[in-house]
Amino acid sequence: MLKISVDGVEMEVEEGRTILQALDDRGVLMNGVDVPHYCWHPGLSIDGSCRLCQVEIEGVPKLQIACNTPVQDGMVIHTQNDRVETARQGVMELLLVNHPLDCPICDQAGECKLQDYAFEYGQPHARTQEPRRALKKRYDLGPTVLLDQERCILCRRCVRFCREVPGTGELSVFNRADESVIDFFPGNELDNDYSMNVADICPVGALTTKDFRFKIRVWFLEDVPGVCTGCSNGCNIHMGVANNKVYRYLPRRNDLVNQTWICDEGRMSYKSVGAPDRLQQTLLRGDLGVLEAAPFAEGISQAAGRLRKLVDAHGPGVVSAVASAHATNEDLFTFSRFLESLGSETSGVAVVNGKQDDLLIKKEKAANAVGARALGFGDARVVAERVRGGGVQALIVMGHDLLDESILAEPESLARLDTLIVLDTHRSNLERYATVVFPVRHAAEKAGTLTNHAGRVQRIEPGVEPAFEAYSDGEVLAQLGSALGFEGWDGSYDVAQVSEELSTRQPAFSGVHLGTVGSAGLPLPGTPGKAGRDS
Amino acid sequence: MVISEEIRAKIDAEIAKYPVKRGALLPALHLVQSEHGYISNELAKELGELFEIRPIEVMEVVSFYNMFYDSPQGRHHVYVCTNLPCSLRGGRDLLRQLESHLGLKPGQTSADGRITLNHEECLGACGYAPMMRVGAQYYENLDLEQAKKILSELE
Amino acid sequence: MLKAPYVTNYLTEHFGEDDYGTLEGYKRRGGYEAARKALSQMSPEEVIDQVKDSGLQGRGGAGFSTGMKWSFMPKDSDKPKYLACNADESEPGSFKDRIILERGPHLMLEGILIAAWATGAEKTFIYCRGEYAFPGACVQRAIDEAYAAGVFGKNALGTGFQHDVVLMLGAGAYICGEETGLLESLEGKKGQPRKKPPFPAQYGAFGMPTTVNNVESFSHVPFIINNGAEWFKGFGTDKSPGTTIFGVSGHVVRPGLYELPLGTRLDEIIFEHAGGVPGGKKLKGAIPGGMSMPILPAGQLEVPMANEFLREHKTMLGTGGIMVMDETTCMVRAGVVISYFFRDESCGQCTQCREGTGWMHKVIERIERGAGTDRDIGILEDVAAKMEGQTICAFADAAAWPIQGLLRHFRNDFEEHVSRKKCPFSESFEL
């Protein structure tokens, strides 16, 4: 470790890091010492071209860029003095020479680093009289992103991103001098699994996603930290919420999970929260054999009645369960305790596999398969096999991943069941066979923890309230357990308490619960807890 | 394949000179351009394959250098130096006169595709101004009549 | 082929003799004896020391000690080491390297071979500007001859030392004369200068330790090896030894090349050697060292052409390209031409350079059109200050300095444009 001084504050930093990296390592960048920068990004190679991060180093005559200057023992750095600020003002004024003054109609306004730093370091009046560059606007880069070349400040983050992260390299700077523009090669547009990250890292309004453009002004959005549930990587996200609606997911930095990135599919999965196919009512199969809306309490009482009857007649062995790998550890823990109380011994978790890569996208297409397995849920295919064989009379299913043909290839076999109880967020073909259907909360609508592929347990918080009556899986099960008269089940459900209980009762979760995981998550004991490929 | 065998062989000879294949990209672009007149997207793809880089990396290089073109040019490039040393000795007058003589503005190509006229920055002939470059050939200490004669002899 | 310089000294002594460019002609005049001596009788350290002792400063513009630069190359590196010869001569007003390439290519090649021995480099890449097709061809012919005669290759000059030389032609980008822009271009990329660290001596061409020297810098080396450091210091000034090839252009009777000792007075070069201003006109100003160097007004021409003296006048020797402007010259127009060049040639990486060069050009052009205001002159000074010393390479400085020079000495020209709302110089060159 080396000792440096930044604005009079002594700090120890790792050797081999640059000043900006060292500040970032210590988490003080943007959060104490703000060294403004455009081209530098923690997840990309150093570019050194925007020149905004210049700082004064005692004993060095010229200002130096913090992003590329290695720390040396005893270095005394000033990031805030007059000389540094004058240099920043210079960069800001020059960046604005050609930047359109269209903040009122720019979608980046409110989260624009050019706007922010111009406010901080800029001058109240532009001294330019000359016309600004006239370049392509609303330029279609591909299926997901638009470019406004006039707004671009040529920091080249997007170019480096495409080359260094997905490795697809669709973007380049063409020409030189003040004719430089970002563009793609004809026929090879910006189209990769991570394409929309370029809009996040674009410090200005040059790159915007087609999806979010003009949906809402960002200052109306509240950021709620969350976790993407698209696959077992558990990328950390910010949910952008306004008027009880999720407008977008943005990646939230977690260097142990997703750096600052998210895949496009995960990003777009925010749409599943307010999707038209959300289950919105408790459904009961009536006398006519048709599913009909019913009050929640009626659903609980019907489900409990049918289960009780079957267990009393045939013993708990005829009840099986399929857990969802999308549910939280708390939901699943409650489910396992529920099944234990019921006496059911056959249960499994349904996990759908899909495409994976070396970056973020993992094979298992659910956020909590590892958690479910750690809680003792086996393979749902075993349950499916029993259903097919006719050995199951009642099945309790969370979610509908069971319907994947890799798990239950013949959904018709569900028709053999006497009772099918479904807890799900979205509609599915399970409705054809279901006896009772409970709408449950989406991950964006509840609190809890999820365990990613590497064993990292991460917290989610409710960002929105469903516009209809819906509870978390755990809450539904607590009600059902109470209706079944399980000992100690009074129908109440406190997620924090459940989480703590889980961590006490399950050695695999020792010490890891809602109250301890924090915003960056905690690994389960004995797991790596950080990036690596699915086994 | 659009690049001829002959040019391809010359590119291979260039590649052999560099520790990393891509080192020969500029020489290769010169060679290919000498055959095709400019670097089309199709050629960029072929060069990309040859150099194991993306076509966009070929075209960003093309866009950076004055001597590479991404669109068809006249058979002869006539460049008149208008940088300061030449300006002081009539470089700009020469360009204006050639513009009216040829009926072309800088950057334009004659209707018959014979000549592309343009101005250029310093060509390292400051002591022999005014001067023009026609393709690889320098013509120095020029006056209008000499310049016209040179142009009239271009095929 | 270019004529020999009007004035020659040791470096260009034989440039008037057509066979000097051939291996045979070069050898007949003692060529490659210095390399033979260095490779067979001197250790690399002795060569570096001798070049250091000679005080030879790089002739590419920055004037850094050549021997010092060589000593930065790692001694015990398991990586291959390279040299790059900067033959990308593109500085407006400079045309001196071209004559070496055309008339004395073996002189440069011999210097390269000596430098290779001194630094342990296994290969030299000669990066020649693309427009120099003919000078490039002269060099290639010399390389081919040298290989055929065993000067280069596995057993250079029969000494067992291995060295290869590759000539590469650029493609028209001034910035490739900046040493790391050159390295990028050599690697087949856009010639955008690299941020430092790392420096080329650690991470140069293709990631290997590399030293970049200018054509003329290499060409002085055989003389230093043959005659010794003391002999070399007999030319020029104490701090700036040796001769250089001054290029004189613009409003002089005899524009062309003059090999003269460093420290020769600027007025002597312009008036005595180049014949002064033609047509009986008065001299208004002269740029002493290529277009990036600040101009000097008529009253400051008695300065000796060496950095230690030029610095006192807030300018530098640069590449020794002297541009002379007579009394008819509109300095605002000169500013338009200068700022256009830098606007056109900026590589576009750094904010200050990309945006500043364009802004300066637009403002100067407006002043020239008669549409400028008093405030515009202040803007020019301010933008130049914002560009200076803050970017990856020295290009932004090179763009700012000449404009600062014009404002320092010819502010009146700018002010008159503003107050009269038109260009007052009716006889100046037309834009």
Image: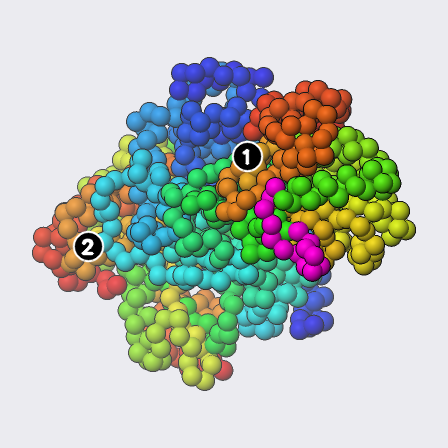
Seen from the viewer's position, the closer of residues A50 and C181 is A50
Asked if residue A320 lies left or right of residue A474, the reply is right
Q: Which color mode does the image show?
A: rainbow
- Secondary structure beneath label 1: loop
Q: Residue furthest bottom?
A: B112
Residue A56 x/y as whole percent: 39, 26
Magenta region includes residue A285? yes
- For the point 71% across and 20% down, the residue is A504
Magenta region includes residue C334? no
Residue C199 x/y as whole percent: 55, 35
Seen from the viewer's position, the closer of residues A367 and C351 is A367
- Secondary structure beneath label 2: helix
Q: Is residue B19 visible?
A: no
Task: Look at mark 2 in the image and give the residue it sits on.
Answer: C367
Q: Which residues are magenta?
A: A284-297
Q: CA distance from mark 2 to mark 1?
A: 61 Å
Task: Look at mark 1 in the image and give the residue it sits on.
Answer: A461
Asked if residue A293 lies left or right of residue A113, the reply is right
Seen from the viewer's position, the closer of residues A286 and A127 is A286
Q: Amino acid at mark 1?
A: Glu
Seen from the viewer's position, the closer of residues C27 and A261 is A261
Q: Amino acid at mark 2?
A: Ile
**A306 relative to A253, above or below:** below
Mark 2 vs mark 1, foreground winner is 1
Query: Label 2 is found on which chain of the structure?
Result: C
**A241 relative to A79, above or below:** below
